[in-house]
Amino acid sequence: MAPKRKIDGSPAESLAQRLSRMSLAASAQDFSQVLHLANEALKSSPPNPQLMRDKVVALIKLDKYKDALSFLDESTTFLSAKDTALERGYCLYKLGKTDEAQKVLQQGSGRAVQHTLAQNVCIIPPVRSYPASDFGRHIERKTLKLQCEYMENWQRQNRCSITNCRT
């Protein structure tokens, strides 16, 4: 069977070739090229979850958080909310939507999610939204809540409680 050709008669690039070019562009930190190649690949091939994630990561690396969220919203058929909790939560965090980011990140797991949760808690809200006397207490409560959640997750993962675990 003859290889597929573009309209201009040149051979069509395979998905594997595009992925290889995307990998090279990502290695060179050229995320605008990664985004361009991901868009091309998504137009010419059936929906591919890995390509979609690569596009989201490229958008995030280019600080296009609203675009990344929009694309994630459009791609819910192929990308599950749990699998993209980190990316979605990070975008929300960078857009200053801390409460929403907190809820989304709670669905995820792993060190990167925990790190983003910790960053999210440390965001200092605008001073004008808190009376000076309540500001410190608000940050204290958020920090304490995160520490408790982290410890509970650690206990669940290690199947122990603080009283019977010696590490």
Image (cartoon, rainbow, N blue to C red):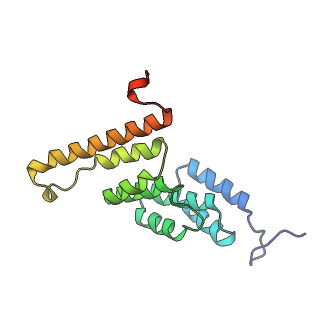
> Which quadrant is home to the C terminus?
top left
**99 displayed left or right of 76:** left
Q: In percent of the image, x 46 and y 30: which residue is there?
A: 160
- Which quarter of the picture shows residue 141? top left
Residue 163, placed above or below residue 154: above
Using the image as rendered, state which of residue 148 and residue 97 is in the foreground. Answer: 148
Provide residue 84's location: percent of width, then percent of height.
51, 56
Work out whether residue 161 can be spotted: yes
Residue 71, placed above or below residue 107: below
Q: In percent of the image, x 71 and y 61: which residue is there?
A: 15
Q: In percent of the image, x 51 and y 60: which residue is there?
A: 81
Provide residue 41's location: percent of width, then percent of height.
65, 66
Using the image as rendered, state which of residue 159 and residue 115 is in the foreground. Answer: 159
Provide residue 62's location: percent of width, then percent of height.
45, 58
- Which quarter of the picture shows residue 155? top left
> Which quadrant is home to the N terminus?
bottom right
Q: In percent of the image, x 21 and y 42: which residue is there?
A: 140
Provide residue 134's location: percent of width, then percent of height.
12, 50
Residue 6, placed above or below residue 48: below
Work out whether residue 62 can be spotted: no
**75 displayed left or right of 68:** right
Q: Residue furthest bottom?
A: 7
